[in-house]
Image: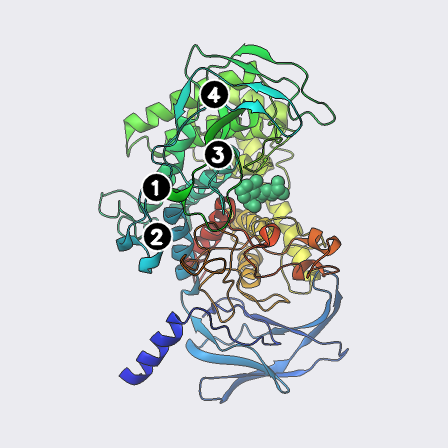
Amino acid sequence: MSRLLLGAAAALLTTAATQAPPALIRIDQAGFETRGPKIGVLPSTQGKPLAWTLTDAHGKTVASGQTTPVGPDAASGESVHRIDFGTFQTPGTGYRLRVGSDASHPFAIADRPFQRVATAAMAFFYQQRSGVPILPAFVERKDLARPAGHAPDIATCFAGIDQKGAKWPGCSYRIDATGGWYDAGDHGKYVVNGGVSAWTLLDLYERLPALGDANAFADGRLALPERANGKNDLLDEARVEVAFLLSMQIPEGTKLAVAPDAGVPGKTITRFETINASGLVHTKIADENWTGLPTAPAEDRQTRFLYPPSTAATLNMVGVAAQCARIWQTIDPAFATKCLAAARRGWAAALRHPNLLTSSDFTGSGGYGDPDVRDEFTFAAAQLYATTREPTFLDRLRKDGIFAYPGTDIGWGSLRLAGALTLATATGDLPADDRATLRNRITALADGFVAEGKRSGYAIPFGGTNYPWGSSSSILNRAIVLGVAWQINRKPAYRNAVVASLDYILGRNPLDRSYVAGIGARPMQHPHHRFWAAAADKRYPPPPTGVLSGGPNSAAANEPGPMKGCAPQTCWIDDYRAFTVNEVAINWNAPLVWTGAFLDATRGR
Ligand code: 9MR
């Protein structure tokens, strides 16, 4: 490429507001793996196959074939044809699929298209850090640097009247919860959601050696202040959140008034009871009232409170702390010891208070209420067993029936399957029968996801028409299950379905959108985020590359507004005010990192 052309390309990259016009043939806008599956989707009501061609950067036809009509598809609201060009394996750029006068965006075929996705998705976490300045040296544009927010983040328990009129008494202590990651577009820091997010990144760390790329995040691979500390960068980032989770635990000998009826469906709070709260974990530290957009973390003037401890928050911390204990055992034994002690203390506290539910009745922060904490117990027991091999945790897992029924989906309120994935591949002495049963159940689950992919118009392992809040993560969390199933038996269909999940996220969808900022011809640009708020106020920056939108939320179909009546996969809008579809969050970016890194580590296999 001439210098002139390079200059033009650079200019194109910096004019972030430009978007390619929509294309009718939908493809993964981040490109395809040289030896991986390659599928494009064309909406068409034609009942017969149509002729397609693949052209190269010079417009020359390099492959051709016939589309496969799939017919009407409820999730997209379209009738679609699939274009399978997986046999074409010549790397290059500027390829386009064409059918008649329609074409896809130009795309690349390359050996490692997902490496950049995984690295960019990891950069999100550094930029969500609380309590430290985000330094220009570690961000892609100077305008993304910012002063530290909530430094320090020290708070006492919420005292006052909640949204349902209950009068909370507060407490006599304060906790220093400085650090961790902001959850999402808001400045709350939630233990429940921090748990699944940290588990996901730590799980990836634990799996990478078996996937063939132990050095994927070796020291220096990520743009972090810790990039030359001799430690793995994925661990450097995850540790930020682990430390926060530990900090939210209540010290020994602490008495606290709690509301036993909080969070119980159908009940209102009528009484408080003073308990021995030692070892329990506060659900969140967050603002008393919602702030507006924009608000940089350092500009937040709201009072911060600790919100009541819950069994779910406690068990989230326990699971991740147990995982921490085995991961850091050789890397930082003192930290590992601290993690294990916290996990054991938390486990004992959760057993003492097995039904302390989360109250979602406070304003200023999200609810993350979960009336069923059985899966959190199973998750914590699984992590404790994987770390300690103590029979009491195995007994609990058997009693919970995890080996025969590992669960169906992973989410912030559903952790059973996360525990099962850990156990299925944990090294050591898991009883052979239990392990075999569990592995069979997990591959059967993966088979079901693959079968859903065959039925789905856009060929993703997520059938049905219920696209919940954060559907991007629902799909990517299935891809994690498929990735672990592939680790178990190397069935190519599992890895292909992981590719399909990312293909959908990165552009093979009826909106022809990449839901990841900065990646692809038509990326999301205007997330609901208090700092990356250029759309609300030009003095604030647009989002960095690698941030994942929550994605379509089929509930929007029933609400007045621009999405009314939308087909599930189209219930989305690139509008910073649309927080039910276009927020970003740690538990959504984490599976993007996991799946991108999985594909990159297993490239060519
Ligand atoms: O991801 C959460 C989603 O499952 C819930 O339906 C929704 C409403 O309660 O809340 C989402 O989590 C938000 C959290 O409560 C506050 N920070 C932003 C999160 C993402 O929107």
Q: Whereabouts is ligand 1, in terms of quadrant?
A: top right
Q: Earlier in the sequence, mark 2 or mark 4?
A: 2
Q: Position of residue 500 (x, y in %)?
A: 57, 61
Q: Secondary structure at mark 3?
A: strand
- Nearer mark to the viewer, of 1 and 3: 3
Hey, what amino acid is under mark 1? Leu
- Nearer mark to the viewer, of 2 and 3: 3
Q: CA distance from mark 1 to mark 3?
A: 25 Å
Check the image and report above or below for 171 versus 376. above
- Nearer mark to the viewer, of 2 and 1: 1
Quadrant of residue 504 within the rendered picture? bottom right
- Nearer mark to the viewer, of 3 and 4: 3
Question: What residue would you read off at disc 3?
Answer: 286
Residue depicted at x 67% and y 50%: 448
Q: Position of residue 93 (x, y in %)?
A: 42, 78
Colour logic: rainbow
Q: CA distance from mark 2 to mark 3?
A: 34 Å
